[in-house]
């Protein structure tokens, strides 16, 4: 069974007010059970400053991942996820050699 999961790797924030300004994310796709194929993508986005700041400790990972996807936009999210599918396809059935 194949799965694609978005993770929050790190968040940079301003100490003065807790504004989280940069999110570093990773996207991991796994496929198969024996063997297991894995592909990943890492990136960073600048987060938009909201009108009202939540306390940094109150922010939920799922909400920040949703913000990352919103900033990237649906087309870029699709490109990232499809590139991982293609990478695993190349692992399963190589078309290039070294």
Image (tube, rainbow, N blue to C red):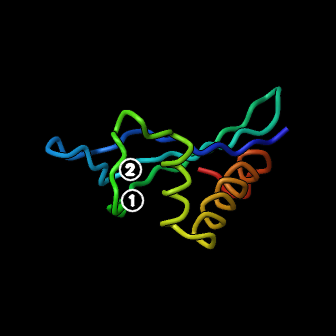
Residue appearing at x 46%, y 47% in the figure:
25
Q: Is residue 92 left or right of residue 61?
A: right
Q: Give residue 86's quadrant in the image.
A: bottom right
Residue appearing at x 60%, y 63% in the figure:
77
Residue appearing at x 55%, y 60% in the figure:
69
> Could you tell me how many numbered marks the image carries?
2
Question: Residue lying farthest left?
Answer: 16
Q: Is residue 53 left or right of residue 86?
A: left
**Residue that numbered label 1 is attached to:** 45
Residue 85: tell me if it is visible: yes
Residue 46: tell me if it is visible: no
Residue appearing at x 71%, y 46% in the figure:
91
Of 9 and 32, which appears nearest the observer?
9
Q: Regarding mark 1 in the picture, which secondary structure is present there?
A: strand
From the image, which quarter does the N terminus lie in?
A: top right
Q: Residue 36 carries which label?
A: none
Q: How far apart are marks 1 and 2 (CA)?
A: 5 Å
**Residue that numbered label 2 is attached to:** 23
Q: In this view, does 39 lie to the left or right of 30?
A: left
Of 89 and 93, which appears nearest the observer?
89
The crowding category of the residue bearing disc 1, from other C-alpha atoms within 10 Å (few below 14, some 14 to 19, many at least 20), is some
């Amino acid at each position: 069974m194949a799965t694609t999961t978005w993770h929050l790797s790190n968040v940079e924030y301003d100490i003065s007010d807790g504004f989280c300004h940069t999110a570093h994310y990773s996207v991991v796709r796994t496929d198969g059970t024996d063997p297991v194929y894995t592909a990943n993508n890492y990136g960073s986005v600048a987060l938009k400053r909201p009108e009202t700041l939540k306390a940094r400790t109150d922010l939920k990972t799922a909400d920040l991942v949703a913000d990352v996807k919103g900033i990237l936009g649906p087309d870029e999210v699709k490109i990232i996820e499809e590139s991982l599918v293609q990478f695993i396809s190349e692992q399963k059935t190589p078309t290039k050699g070294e």
